[in-house]
Image (tube, grey):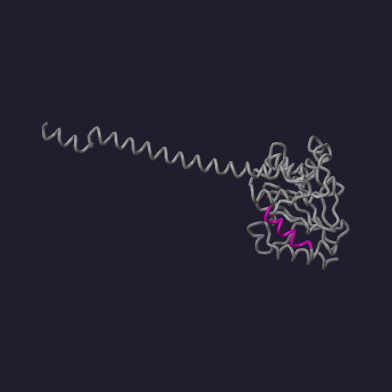
């Protein structure tokens, strides 16, 4: 072999070296694929376990991550437009919340609403109206129907908490039918057969969802949650420079300031 041939063989590593490198690359690719497969299976398993838990919840058995006792003794009903209302409909301050069950900001704003129950809703100073935004085929469509169907039995807000709590734990799996029926089964005092009948098709529920979309368009809602106090946009102070409509998950203190301002106008 000439010196030139020797240099060429050495620089390329030779056939054996090339085969070894190819085997090493194939093995790395297989390891990466195994890791990806394990991750996908793990995520799927979490969802399957969640479905099994929800589907098999005994009647009146709340999931451990949900506590709806804060609604005990508080009036629940619907507005003339069919939107769920929590508290006295004649309260001096009405807070309307345009919301979507699949919206993370709306989920976090739910903590703010709970924080308003004892100081404002229970004493009758504030009532909260939930205006559900969704559309057929959307992630939260069936969840919205489930909440409104539970609302026909005076259990909207309990189902509302089940859905938001489930979304925190299970993500989008919380919105699949097996989960929703499981949440309904867990609500004490809810007639499961009546709920199932509503979920099979309710013109009243569909009309409410349509009215919510029309109301959002009429008021220029561009994001969720969008809050109105007695029909007016909130005052969000310096935040209004970047957020002129004051939409999104506004801080608790800001919500309280707006409530107090409206109460002082009464």
Taking the magenta stretch, the answer to whether it contains residue 234 is: no
Instruction: Count numbered badges in the picture.
Output: 0
The residue positioned farthest toward the bottom in the image shown: 264
Of 36 and 266, the residue lying toward us = 36
48 relative to 221 in the view: left or right? left
Is residue 242 placed above or below 181 in the rendered structure?
below
Image-quadrant location for residue 257:
bottom right
Residue in front for this viewpoint, 226 or 35:
35
Name the spot of residue 65 as percent of width and height, x first. Answer: 69, 54
Q: Position of residue 16 (x, y in %)?
A: 25, 34
Quarter placement of the C terminus: bottom right
Q: Which segment did they paint magenta? A: 107-117
Would you identify the image quadrant in which residue 21 lies?
top left
Which residue occupies 68% across, 45% down?
53
Q: Farthest residue toward the right?
A: 90
- Residue placed at 83% from the left, 43% from the top? 191
Residue 176 quadrant: top right
Please say if 255 is above or below 41.
below
Task: Please state the horizontal and vertical placement of residue 75, each as a whole percent of the image.
Answer: 86, 56
Q: At 83% from the left edge and 62% from the top edge, which residue is drawn?
A: 122
Please state which of residues 82 and 178 is positioned toward the viewer in this rendering.
178
Q: Quadrant of the N terminus?
A: top left
Question: Going by the image, does 63 lie left or right of 47?
Answer: right
Q: Main secondary structure of the magenta part?
A: helix
């Amino acid at each position: 072999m000439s010196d030139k041939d020797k240099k060429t063989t050495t620089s390329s590593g030779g056939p054996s070296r090339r085969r070894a490198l190819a085997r090493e690359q194939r093995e790395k690719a297989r390891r990466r694929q195994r890791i990806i497969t394990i991750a996908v299976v793990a995520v799927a398993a979490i969802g399957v376990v969640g479905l099994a838990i929800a589907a098999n919840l005994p009647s009146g058995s709340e999931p451990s991550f949900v506590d709806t006792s804060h609604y005990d003794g508080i009036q629940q009903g619907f507005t003339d437009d069919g939107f769920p209302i929590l508290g006295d409909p004649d309260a001096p301050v009405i807070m309307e919340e345009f919301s979507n069950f699949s919206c993370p900001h709306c989920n976090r704003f739910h903590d703010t609403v709970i924080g308003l129950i004892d100081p404002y809703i229970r004493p009758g100073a504030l009532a909260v109206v939930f205006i559900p935004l969704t559309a057929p085929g959307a992630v939260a469509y069936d969840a919205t129907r489930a909440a409104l169907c539970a609302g026909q039995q005076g259990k909207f807000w309990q189902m509302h908490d089940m859905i938001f709590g489930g979304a925190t734990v299970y993500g989008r799996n919380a919105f699949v039918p097996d989960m929703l029926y499981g949440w309904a089964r867990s609500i004490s005092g809810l007639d499961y057969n009546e709920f199932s009948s509503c979920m099979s098709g309710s013109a009243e529920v569909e009309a409410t969802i349509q009215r919510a979309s029309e109301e959002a368009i009429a008021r220029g809602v561009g994001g969720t949650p969008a809050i109105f106090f007695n029909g007016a946009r909130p005052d969000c102070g310096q935040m209004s420079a970047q957020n002129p409509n004051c939409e999104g998950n506004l801080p608790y203190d800001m919500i309280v300031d707006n409530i107090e301002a409206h109460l002082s106008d009464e």
